[in-house]
Structure formats: C-alpha cells, structure tokens
Amino acid sequence: MRKPTHPEKLYLDFDSFFASAEQQLNPSLQGRPVAVVPLDSPHTSVIAASREAKPLGIKTGTSVREAKEKCPEIVFIEARPDVYVKLHKRILETIERCVPITAVRSIDEVACTLLESEARQASDLAMRIKRSLRDDIGPVLTCSIGISLNELLAKIAAEMDKPDGFVLLDHADLPGRLLGLELRDLPGISKGMAARLSEAGVTDIAGLWALAPKHARAIWNSVEGERFVSALHGHAVEKPETVKRMFGHGRNLRPDWRAPEKVLQCARLLTLSAARRLRRSHYRAGALSYTVGTRRESRVTLEGRFRAARDDHTFLNCLNGLHEKFINTGEMRNVTTVTVALHELSSEVEASRDLFDTRENLKQRGQWERVSDVLDKIRGRHGSKALNLGPANGPGNYIGSKIAFGRIPSPEDF
C-alpha cells in the first residue's frame, strides 16, 4: 500500500455551520446562544447549536425543553435549508479560488488534494483560505482545517483544534499526536464500534494503532476495518465510489399532524420529493417502503413492489395501499415520524417489458411518466408550490429538502 511522501489531503470543516450561518446572516444573533431546530415546535430537538450555546451543554439532539432549562435566553431558529444551500455554493466558489475541491462530503465539509508545492506551504494555504472566507462570507462563519497524509487523518486533524483551528499531521506526528484522543473522537468509531473494539481488548488509540490490518478487518467484519487502520498509519487509502441504493425522505411530525389523514398527506409529499430526485438522477425504482415511528420509539415498515417505474402515479398508488394496511394494523396511533423510500433502483433506460404488459398498460404508463416530467418542469420554473398532485402543504417548510450528511439538496428540491 502506498505511503505518501507529503501531506496530500486538506479537510475543511465549518464550525457550528447552521447556527453560525444564521448569526452571520443576522447580526442581531451574534454573540447570543442560538439553536437551530428542524421545525417550530416545543417537541423537537436541536440540530445545531452556536458556540455560545455549546458550553452550556446544548448540542445536537438536545430537546427544546432541555435547552430552555439550561439556557432560558436561548434563541431558537427554524432551519432554512434553501438559505444554507445558497451559502454553501458561495463558500465552494471561494475555496475553489484558493485550492481545487476534490470532494464535497457534506454541506459544511470539503476535501481537497494538494500538490507537493502546496503541502510545503500548508500553513500559508490554510490561512489564505480562512482569510478569503472571512472577506467573502464574513467573520462569524469560521472553519477548522486539517492537512495530512490521507483524508481520514486530515479530518481527524480538522477536529483537533476547533473552533477556527488548523492542524498539520505528517508521518513524524504519528501516532504521538493522536494518543491524547479518545476512540470516539475518531470519525467512523461509533458507540457500537467502540464496544466491538473494547470486546477485542482495544480501549484506546494506542491499542487501535497496534492492531494488524487483518485483525481490524475481523473486528469490523468488513474490509473497512483494514482500510481504517491502514489510513490511521498514514497510508493512502482510496475508498470505492458508493453505489446509490435508494431515494428517501423522513419527517418528524408535530402533534397537529399525527392524525392518519395528515400522516398520509405528509407521506405523499415526501414520496413526490423522492420521486423528483429519482427522475433527476435518471433512475427507476421497483419498490417503496413506508415507515412510521411512534412515541414508544418503535418503528413499523411496510413495503410494496411494482414494475420498475419513475412516475408519481405508480408511487402514490403504492403508498395509498400501504397506508390502508397501516390503518388496519392499528399502528397509526401515536405516530411521531414518517419515512418513505424508493429503492430496488435500475437505470432509467433499462426498463424491460413485462410478459403480461398490454398495449393499454404501456400507453397509460407512458402518459403518467410524461405527466410527471411536465410537473417537474413547471415546479422548476415557477416554484415548488406551482402545481402538485394533491395538497402542497406539509408540517412546516421544506418537505423533502432536509440537508442530510452526504446529501445537499439541489435548488429543484425547494
């Protein structure tokens, strides 16, 4: 496995991105504890806390009630994904003027590959990026930058000096500068993975460093373990491109959106949003799963299958049938979340004729596909509420346009 001769990767991670973005865009929020929430409801949780709120114990996942108890003067802001996506685009343009971006890992994280000449001036490059962001975007939205031999180590470095920090890790720094970290500080070491490592006798970074790659593979039960330990030792490890497996959206429901007819209305909007993404990516789906979660923290999923399709009519018909089954099971009581996913994907052009397809079936399917394409064009030109199959209003704003790790909504999602 190749060992880089110089730090090849730069990882940039913004500090408290959503909350800092709101403070940057609204000066009256600057210097105040701010929490961004997914919807305006006392029954939801924080998705981002400002640097003024974090020392008070408010973080991602803290309930609104608990956040108020810890900080009565905290300001809650309902998330504005469309604003964050526009800001994200401006940020990428600024970074690109300093160094080419190799990969956008999330709305607030990017990775860059460095030339040897750039690596020799690592500190100057990091400061130039920070200065450009301050000049173009503003001083509140800061970032932490890590530069190292591969992306894993660069990401670890970016986390080591937050907020607004810079850390360079080269071969001579390994493993020494990592030994003060906890296992859970490393990206990819979840609570469950930490428990697995502990069962194998690995409880700290020194123990993880000492693992043979093949042993790590056995603990992870995957080649990812071998890749992880090799990357930790400073080897260049390139991950294969992930294969798209589904298009889905979920939503927490306010109390006034938990009646069966409201749950279905929300699920329909989530389905239509997933279907638009599927068509933009030139896929068809052969199955739809419909999941409801309850206050008892239990989840029930029903699944429907159909001939590979790309039209709203097919997906909504399947959803309606699954919803009726849910009602009959009695699981529609105390519903708090709803999730819809289109999966069993195939290429848009790979549709094959079913043995029992009739000319009328093919004609009708083609008509509904054309209707779906026309609806997409109208919404793209005139806005998300211009035309819709059924009610266009959901529980709060931004149905189906939530920013998730690794997925940034496109303008057509809003």
Image: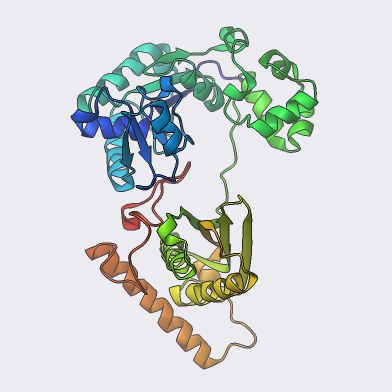
Q: Is residue 400 above or below residue 53?
A: below
Q: Is residue 353 above or below residue 90?
A: below
In the picture, residue 167 is in which quadrant? top left
Residue at (30, 40) in percent of width and height? 89
Q: Estimate the x, y position of residue 250 in percent, counting from the top left.
A: 49, 55
- The answer to whether residue 67 is seen in the rendering is yes
229 vs 75, left or right, is right
Q: For the image shown, how many numbered marks are present on the structure?
A: 0
Color encoding of the figure? rainbow
- The answer to whether residue 351 is seen in the rendering is no
Q: Is residue 31 above or below residue 317?
A: above
Residue at (51, 77) in percent of width and height? 317
Q: Estimate the x, y position of residue 229 in percent, counting from the top left.
A: 68, 24
In the image shown, does 109 or 383 lie closer to the viewer?
383
**Which quadrant is home to the N terminus?**
top right
Q: Is residue 311 above or below residue 227?
A: below
Q: Estimate the x, y position of residue 148 in percent, counting from the top left.
A: 51, 18
**Which quadrant is home to the C terminus?**
bottom left
Residue at (38, 12) in percent of width and height? 123
Q: Estimate the x, y position of residue 366 in percent, counting from the top left.
A: 44, 82
33 vs 244, left or right, is left
103 vs 296, left or right, is left
